[in-house]
Amino acid sequence: MGKRRWLLLLVAACALALGGCGGDDGNDEGGGDGGGSGGTLVFAGASDPVVIDGALVSDGESIRVITQIFETLIGLKPGTTDLEPALATKWEIGPDAKTYTFTLRDGVKFHDGTDFNAEAVCFNFDRWYNFKGPLQSSSASYYWQSFFGGYAKNESEDLSPSLYKSCEAKDAKTAVITLTKPSASMLGALTQQAFSIASPKALEEFKADAGTVDEETGFRPTGTFGTEHPIGTGPFKFESWKRGDRLVLAKYDDYWGEKAKLDKVIIRPIADNAARLQALQNDEIQGYDLVEPQDVPTIEGDENLQILERPAFNVAYVTINQKQKPMDKLEVRQAVAYGLDREAVVNNFYGGRGVVAKEMMPPEVMGYADDVTEYKYDPDKAKSLLQKAGLTLPVPIDFWYPTDVSRPYMPDPKRNFEAFAASLNKSGFKVTPHSAPWSPDYLGRVDEGTAGHLNLIGWTGDFADPDNFIGVFFQSYSPQFGFRNPELFNLLDQGEAEPEEAKREDIYKQANRLIMDFLPAVPYAHSKPALGFRADVEGYEPSPTTNESFAPVSIGGGD
Amino acid sequence: MLRFVIRRLLLLVPILLGLSILVFAWIRALPGGPAEALLGERLTPESRQQIEEQYGLDDPVFVQYWRYLKTTVVDRDLGTSINTRRPVSEELKERFPATIELAVAAMLFAMVLGVPLGYVAAKRYGGPVDQASLVVSLLGVSMPIFFLAILLKYIFAIQLGLLPTVGRISVLIDIEHPTNFYVLDAIIAGDPEALWDVIKHLILPAIALGSIPLAIVARITRAATLDVQNEDYVRTARAKGLPPRIVDTRHIFRNALLPIATIIGLQTGLLLSGAVLTETVFAWPGMGTWLVEAIDNRNYPVLQGGILFVSLVFVLVNLLVDLSYALINPRIRVS
């Protein structure tokens, strides 16, 4: 063929491509129609949800969707950890701290038209309490186990007797929950989405607990409650779900509270961070969660985009495993604390979104003590402490960090590690580095206590209660920390059971002081995860415990 | 011919059996198990023990294998995904069509561009087209796919606003998915807007994924054509006075086709095993990301079912390639 013909063909092909691909239908998916109401918002999660049933999940993406469709008895003031009425308008704790009386909200209906009442509340609580078989696994009902312990009939000896005793529907608007032991932290715990109230009719009709159990195939849910008919009372109702593609929520017109501004919210799974950023830049999504620190300046520098900050509700810390000598000596642990340059790490590797942590829970949580012992970076002090302990310098230690991962409290583990190792080496230690891929290798090792003398890890709180931080870490022996401290264990037991708010706060403050003297770990950072949105998205209120509703959100609400 | 096919199909049984043992043993040899992935920082020794019991992972390996074999062969059940709690076969039915669509689109791109490019390069040996084809091939092979993908997205989506960056279809378009082949689904739904949208979503991933096969197909075509051009029978055909077009198609191209077909077959087989990097960058819900995530999560049932399936596909594709030889070259049919 002649040269000319080739050229013509090429030009024709280009013209076709450019012409056919219309002007603006290549991008701009979602977006509102101005005026601040209506429209569709597309939000990207990191993966598909597992199932839309609060009682049976613990992954963030399921919880994100559940937060829109369901509600709990007690809610949180947006953006804070302060309790506020939700499905319950009033609550009273009995003098023995074992009975909780809830006055329920009037005029609330589930998305299927059935009434919300005390019977529905007790139906839900009894459902969780009576979980059997594979539903008792911590991979299923983690949050029930974490707070209430066991079930009506425990099928494993690792489960403790249940904290839950019964639920009584005194009348349509009054539900009384009775516990087996006094507990003061149930109110905070009930704000978690795991304790959302679902429509009893739907739970039964769509067989929420049904499934086949087969030793080889494991538990396979056969009901469709959590996959096709998750029916709650929230401002959005479930419309459709195609895995790998989208989950569609639609505004619920008969919501009891402030109705949603958007018509629809579509959640699509995009696992790769760079892909999420480019989709946001291209307006294919209008928001996403957990922006990587290196992308924050890109988003902030783009006038079409904005960054929202989630208040810190996590703690990054260095585990000290006291089973690994010489970590069993207090002076050595103190030397570690003085030998870590925490300020340098927080200032350099947290993209301006971290604060130095001085104790093992964030300041927002009740029981935080301002007067704990603090350890400013002091290599010489560290060295003298080691010598006082009778050790020859440098003291060899194994220090582990994870690879292939970025956690909200630890965006760049390797950089944290390198800085810490360098500062420890200046402080009389000789660090041998070890690393392993985060999941499952590293996590497994940390949990088993085979991740050296020191390792980097952290924790994001589930709900605003000190028990959910230091109770989780230090209430009993664990291989991770490898110590037994009866004084600390007892103090934390006391705190969990103390019904009087003020006394409880004192106990936890005491515990925090004790922890920062005993030094089972060295906390170093609280960080504020970042969310990215289009600039014209308004009304999204980040919450420390990720109780974030799309109801107040609107797009393009004027200037 | 029929015996040939049957013999090859029968060979599948020992191949798959051996593979299943290998996969089964290998993934359990990796440290850790599904508990860490399921619980993350919430892991405790008790909860890990509980999860291992639940999934039968505390039984001896051969007991686990026997159970697996029984369920797969007798019950025809590939098991349940540990992370999503769904049947592996159901996830396979969603993931594989996505991978096929992407692979076919990428190979089409590679063939439609690569074969003519290589052919013309050979016919105009040493000319500007030949030089250009060399550059294209080198670029295609050397540029990392994810980099090319991000670059393509940046230019064609973000800067020019012509194409989308993620997914298989716009979230604002709603069609039924009877086949999970989105192109077919759009055709079945009779929705031209949806069809065009699906195709737009295929363009950039196909180019990114097809860049390497394009390079390879172009070079192989060029080499094969050059080779055949200089054969005696071509000289004879020309000497006979056959018009150049006939010489080209009946003698040169047809004989060059053999190695080209082999390469296309092998490349397709590779692509069908899942293009992880492309799928990751374009959030394409295919086999690649499915299996890689399963490795990280130690999602044993998905790995066992998925890898076995991928191997099956690869073997069948190679069988088809072998059969195609017989089509192209009559002499092979006889033997």
Image (cartoon, coloured by chain):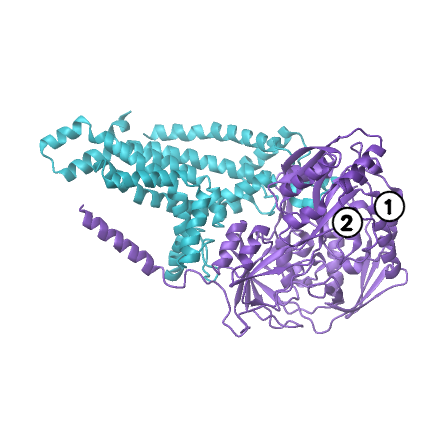
Sequence-earlier tag: 1 or 2: 2
x%, y% of residue A503? 89, 58
Q: Tell me if B224 is positioned left or right of A149 in this view.
A: left
Numbered circle sitting on residue A208 = none
Residue sitting at x 35%, y 28%:
B4
**Chain drawn cyan, letter?**
B
- Kind of element beneath mark 2: loop
Residue sitting at x 70%, y 74%:
A107
Residue B225 shows up from this direction: yes
Residue that label 1 marks? A488
x%, y% of residue A328? 82, 35
Marks 1/2 same chain = yes
User: Which quadrant: the C terminus of chain A?
Assistant: bottom right
Residue that label 2 marks? A360
Residue type at tag 2: Met
Which residue, as the protein is rendered here, is positioned at the far left? Answer: B241
**Which residue is more in the foreground, A509 or A165?**
A509
